[in-house]
Image (cartoon, rainbow, N blue to C red):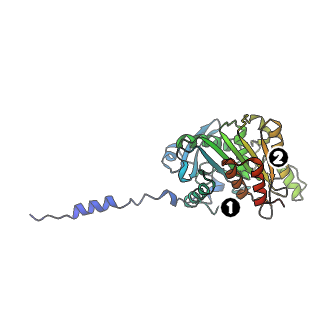
Amino acid sequence: MRRTWLPIVFLLWIFATPCSGQTNPADEVFPVDDLPRGKTIARDECSRLPYAVWVEHQYGSECIRYFPSPGIERAGQVNLFFHGDLLDDNFPIRSAYTDNNAKTLLAYAKRMEATHGFPFVYVGRPGTYGSSGRHAERRRPKEFYSMNAAVDAIKAKHGIGKVLLSGQSGGATIVGAILTLGRTDVLCAVGTSGGYAVLERVELRLRLLGKSRTATGKDSTGYSDFYDVIKYVSGIRPDPQRRIFVIGDPLDQMTPFSLQKKFADLVRAAGHEVQVVEARGTGSLHHGLRPVGLLAVGLCGRGVPTEELILKIHAAASPG
């Protein structure tokens, strides 16, 4: 009887060929349109996503995406970075969201690990980089509680020891907020161009722009139930090993340096070690300081003494 091997060959071809529905996690792209409209993710869907943790707290729940460097597993210390705002009021800042894909973020995390000598994680704030939530509702309590819970979840998932927190602009605000929520596992906290006093910032910005209108009790997002970090400094827990750096440009027209210094003064008065460092911000608004912040957190994580660290920051970015 004649035999044919076609069915066997065909089956082998099926099992050897990737399913058309399967994609490389690094190929994910995060639509710009998700920034203003928000994104909803169910818990079971979150569990199937790469680089995601489900968080729950008193203000609700969220699926938070993050993009780690290769050495994250069982790491003794990891830097978690929080990016700045990606909406101007409720309009996407497209020039700030050109890295809206997993491949770019994972490559960035890998470079930062190679530069600093310890792992790095790029954390997507609610409504950004594939995380659920609405970025239009930033600075409300839910965002800060979600970010704090995400730190816990990422630590537990990967067996991480201590954390270093860094952030630029709205991400620096998150760093400050997380400190006020009482963490005791932070080796270094570095915030650049942070906004720590919501209403005072609105009023000062209006003055800088030559407008006489006063704040209405609402954030620029239109919400009045914001979490004003500067009012919760008492929540920061004592920790003699932790170092805090507030870095800004006195000419910053987005987040006034005077309010960054005011926040630092209150933190110092509460008994914590904090350093205020002046540096030159990029752009016409003197606001961009991410590279300086990452330099600082890298030095801090490697145990460079504070005075030497500040000298190195000044050498890299002298104030205007």
- SS for dot 1: helix
Q: Position of residue 319 (x, y in %)?
A: 83, 59
- Distance of mark 1 from mark 2, alpha carbons? 24 Å
Q: Amino acid at mark 1?
A: Ala
Q: Amino acid at mark 2?
A: Leu
35 left or right of 286?
Answer: left
Q: Position of residue 282 (x, y in %)?
A: 77, 62
Specify few, some or many for label 2: CA neighbours under 10 Å numbering under 14, 14-19, or 20 or more. Answer: some
Specify few, some or many for label 1: CA neighbours under 10 Å numbering under 14, 14-19, or 20 or more. Answer: few
User: Residue 60 or 72: which is nearer the viewer?
Assistant: 72
- SS for dot 2: helix
Q: Going 77% across and 34% down the picture, which residue do you hit?
A: 234
Res 60 seen here? yes
Circle 1 residue: 96
Q: Going 65% across and 41% down the picture, which residue do you hit?
A: 148
134 left or right of 51?
Answer: right
Q: Tell me if label 1 and label 2 are in contact, CB under 8 Å.
A: no
Nearer the camera: disc 1 or disc 2: 1
Disc on the earlier residue, 1 or 2: 1
The disc placed on residue 21 is: none
User: Residue 224 or 192: which is nearer the viewer?
Assistant: 192
Circle 2 residue: 199
Q: Does 241 appear above or below 254?
A: above
Going by the picture, which residue comes out furthest to the left? 1
Q: Quadrant of the C terminus?
A: bottom right
Q: Position of residue 99 (x, y in %)?
A: 62, 61
Q: Position of residue 119 (x, y in %)?
A: 59, 50
Q: Going 73% across and 43% down the picture, which residue do you hit?
A: 243
Q: Quadrant of the N terminus?
A: bottom left
Q: How many marks?
A: 2
Using the rendered view, name the quadrant where residue 103 is placed.
bottom right
